[in-house]
Amino acid sequence: MNEIRISDVTMKQTGGDISLSFKEKIELCKLLDKLGVSVIELEPIVSAKIDALRVKSAAAAVKNSIVAVPVALNAESVQQTWNALKEAKKARLQVCAPVSPVQMEYLFHKKPDAMLAAVKETVAACCKVCADVEFVADDATRSDPGFLYEVISAAIEAGAGTVTVCDTAGAMLPNEFTAFIRELYANIPMLKDVCLGISCSDSLSMADACAIAAVRYGAREIKAASYRLNVVSLPNVARALSAKGDVYGVACRVHTTVLKRITGQIAWMCQTGRSKNSPFDHGVQEDDGSMYLTAHDDVSAVMKMASRLGYDLSEEDGAKVYEAFRVIADKKEKVGSKELDAIVASAAMQVPPTYVLDSYVVTSGNTISATAHLKLHKHEKVMEGVSIGDGPIDAAFLAVEQITGQHYELDDFQIQAVTEGREAMGQTVVKLRSGGKVYSGRGISTDIVGASIRAYINALNKIVYEEETV
């Protein structure tokens, strides 16, 4: 029985109204890995610092699936992408190239001969560093057949183990698409020695049907999305293959028993975008408690866990965090990720404050919208902001954003009680992400809203200080 690999392209397709935060993308990778997809496709590296960290974090989070990242048609991009991806348990480099005359000349400004040479060189460069290389022929169904056969043959000769053809326009019906695939096998003898993948747009609402039809005629990998997008639906093809796999002599390793639950979680994340009245960026809910340290862990273990939480600590800050960790670890059996967040927030990168809280007035209730009026000092200048939010903390954070004129991704927000009784002290930890790096701030007060504002400003000051000193 032949295995049909499902390659999830959700992160490549999101955009517009769907914008996933850094934390959501890592969580999405974990969910897809649990679901059993064969390949998880990530966006290309555009910003060396921010995107490389995203790829490294995703590669570390995925245990079973292949992690695939596209490269540009040059050797520099290949090396940069591989440096970020090489720690993945299963890594794949993708060489994506337009093969239709329109896209080659008007989008990439390349003639067919130049595109052919670029594909050969890039695939060969990828094969030197990575054992799994995929060539993706964009807009293949509108290309000149002779050139398409030539470029696919060249990619296979250069070492590509997977070749994917794309119906980018989504204009083909199932019978037309299967005829297209039969022609590929008839004219490219080497194609039978590699894995043929397909990608279909859903412009005619035929993508799922085209994908299943392609499987009958030799396709062994399907690019699909776990969320409802204009491509093949992962839930639909997984269910179809599960129901008809015995008839076609194929099987895919997607776990259909958890398909509804996991795709439901993914849909919830994609639908929980940043509202206009909220500074919160992501819909990640769970903390599985699997990450913790004990008194037996050394400084390298503490720094490794801090890195997994997103922190990039200097040697000096690392020493301070470890010293503070030892104090806590001597009193507790386990130190979890949330406690380490609080340690980093209080011990690492303490900087001179750029913004100082002067005063705040927050009003909220079940019959009125929450509003916040904040005054901050910046170099002896008083700055004010007034904002409406979905709650008192939303409103306060939005008022700070209004004053500073900056929005940073709110990576995490934690509230913890540190004393008991009516006058209990509340501790808040706010984690902001800027340039791919996490900055945390800590606030303590009997007023949890005040503690939250102080924690946010504490994290904000660290970002501003580092930006000004670079």
Image: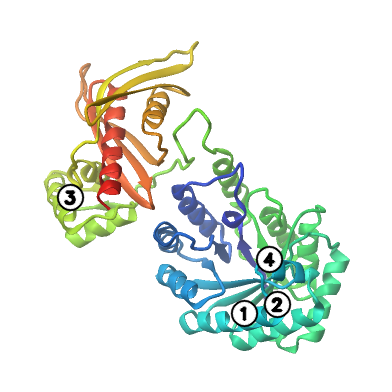
Name the residue nearer the viewer: 417 or 332: 417
Please provide percent x and percent y for residue 5: 64, 68
Type of amino acid under label 2: Lys
Q: Name the residue under label 1.
A: 119
What residue sits 76% from the left and 71% below the top?
Answer: 101
**Mark 2 → mark 3, Cα distance in angstroms:** 56 Å
Of the numbered discs 2 and 3, the one sitting upstream in the chain is 2
Tag 3 residue: 321
Q: Earlier in the sequence, mark 4 or mark 3?
A: 4
Compared to residue 275, the image places residue 385 above or below, namely above
Q: Name the residue under label 2.
A: 111
Q: Residue 222: which disc?
A: 4
Q: Which is more toward the observer, 152 or 241?
A: 152
Q: How far is the residue under mark 4 from the one under mark 3?
A: 46 Å
**Distance from the alpha carbon under mark 1 to that under mark 3:** 48 Å
Q: Gap between marks 4 and 1, in whole Å?
A: 22 Å
Among the two numbered marks 1 and 3 on one chain, the one whose residue lies closer to the N terminus: 1
Mark 4 Cα shell of 10 Å, populated few (<14), some (14-19), many (≥20) = many
* Mark toward the viewer: 2 or 4: 2
Q: What secondary structure is found at the residue carrying circle 2?
A: loop
Q: Quadrant of residue 420?
A: top left
Viewer-proximal residue, 13 or 263?
A: 13
Q: Is 322 left or right of 447, judged from the image as shown?
A: left
The spot of residue 244 in percent (x, y) is 77, 63
Q: Which amino acid does label 4 sit on?
A: Ile
Q: Quadrant of the N terminus?
A: bottom right
Q: Compute the Cα span from label 2 to label 4.
A: 29 Å
Front one among 27 and 294 = 27
Is residue 136 depicted above or below 269 in this figure?
A: below
